[in-house]
Structure formats: structure tokens, C-alpha cells
Image (spheres, grey):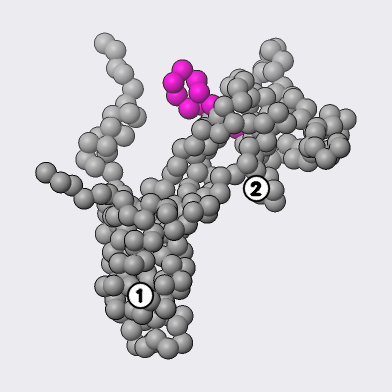
Amino acid sequence: MAHTSGWITIKQMVNEILFETGMDTGYYKKCMHHVINGVREMNKFYCDGVKTEKVTCDSIGVIDMPSDYVEFVRLSFNYGGLMYSLTRRDDIVKTTTLSEGDETLDSDIGEGVALDTGKDYKYATTGGKNDYYYTIDVENDRFIVRGIPTRTLFLQYISSGIDLDDGNGTNIPVKIKEALKSYVLYKNALMDIKADKRLVPLYKQEYNEEVSKLKFLELPTGDELLDMIYGTYSEIRR
């Protein structure tokens, strides 16, 4: 039995919208623009767009943000086959020092210095402090990490769903097709000065209905809900 693919490229999506709506091919670039923005919006707000990426920290404790990065979720390292989260500390010194054109760390001003975790084992010492820290350098689109036991980490983040290096070839899930079509019609009617503005409320309603279906698809199944509940139980020994 032949099966249809669960994915479609953005280019195919645009051509399908132009065909189904009867839009002139002159709308191709504008339609592409709306589709890309629609994919980003749905990945950020309505779909489970969390992506897990294996990343490598460089010699000065820097990890560059992926090109499709939208929002941070978690930065972890492997611990017994599980992802163990680093602790965020925004008081980490984020700067680097240029030396002959290369980024280096100047420990005299706190760059790259191991953090004091306060682990003096004596009376009233608090426990459970993490040795592994990160902060987000938003200005330079990167993460700064300190004290990690390995240079291979796992970055979890909300993806835009768009490969900026090859936007036309990006694959998107078929499940968002109808919502995307409604989004394009709504945005085109809203922004195109030639469009019939009386259609804006109708297209907006259709888009909201398709998004509601999308959110319903993302709800956990009954078995998943049971697993969540059972996972909170403590074992009772008689």
C-alpha cells in the first residue's frame, strides 16, 4: 500500500496555495513570505516545536545559536543516558578578549574563571548545588558555559521550522497545511491594499478554527496522561 508523505516542502506548499486559491503567480514571493511567517508562528505558539540538537562547546566555552533558534528550552549534558540540565547564571562574565584577531579569555577580569560553588562541607552547608552553568549572550547569538565535564552538550529550543540556509527546501509537517492556507489568506486580505477587506474577519475566523484543530492534535494521549500521573506516585512499601 502506498502512503503519502507526512512532510511537504515550503516551495510545494506555496505552489499548492497558489493553485487552490487561484492567485496569480505574481503573488509567489508574497505568498512565500506569508508561509514562512506562518510556519514560524505555528512552531512557536501552537505546535510542539521543541528541537533537540547535539552541540559542541568551543575552547572558550561558547556555543553558537542555531540559525532556526527562536526560544530557549534547556541546555544539558549526558549523565547515564539522561539529559542533566545546566543551571542558568546570568552573572557569568560574558565578554571575551581579542588577541591577534582571535577570541581569548582574560582571567584577570573574570573571563572563563571557574565559579565558586560555595562547597565548603561544614555545619549548615546547603547541598545540591550545580557545578555546571550557562548564560545566554543574546547580543552575540550564543551561549556561554562554565564548568562542564564535556564539550558535547544537548541544546533544546523552539525552532522556527525554517532552515535559513535553504528556505525553499525546508520540510514542514503536513498537519499544519490547512492552518497555513488560512493564515496566508488572512494575512493577504489584511495587508494587500487591493484585497477585499470584508473578507478579513472570515479568513481570521477560519484561521482560528484551524489553529484550534492543531492545538487539539498536540494534546497528550490518554496513555501519556496516565504516565504523567503514575510518574508522580511514590512507591509504598508495606
What separation in Å lies between label 1 and label 2 (alpha carbons)? Answer: 33 Å
Q: Residues within 10 Å of mark 1 (few under 14, many from 20)?
A: many
Dominant SS of magenta comes to: strand
Q: Residue 13, relative to residue 142: is it above or below?
A: below
Q: Which mark is residue 171?
A: none
**Quadrant in the picture for the N terminus:** top left
Q: Which mark is residue 141?
A: 2
Left or right: residue 69 versus residue 148 is left
**SS under mark 1:** helix
Q: Residues within 10 Å of mark 2 (few under 14, many from 20)?
A: few
Mark 1 or mark 2: whose residue is earlier in sequence = 2
Write down the residue under mark 1: 185
Quarter where residue 144 is shown: top right
Quarter where residue 77 is shown: top right
Q: Residue furthest front?
A: 25
**Residue ID at (31%, 51%):** 7
Q: Nearer the viewer, residue 225 or 151?
A: 151
Left or right: residue 66 versus residue 22 is right
Which amino acid lies under the numbered mark 2 shown in the image of this protein?
A: Asp
**Residue ID at (33%, 73%):** 18
**Residue ID at (72%, 15%):** 120
What residue range appears in magenta? 77-87
**Residue ID at (31%, 18%):** 235
Q: Residue 99, relative to residue 202: is it above or below?
A: above
Q: Please indicate, yes or no, whether residue 89 appears anywhere in the rendered image.
A: no
Q: Residue 220, relative to residue 8: is it above or below?
A: above
Q: Residue 48, relative to residue 214: is it above or below?
A: above
Q: Nearer the viewer, residue 217 or 179?
A: 179
Asked if residue 69 lies in the magenta stretch, the reply is no
Q: Position of residue 167 (x, y in %)?
A: 47, 57
Which amino acid lies under the numbered mark 1 shown in the image of this protein?
A: Leu
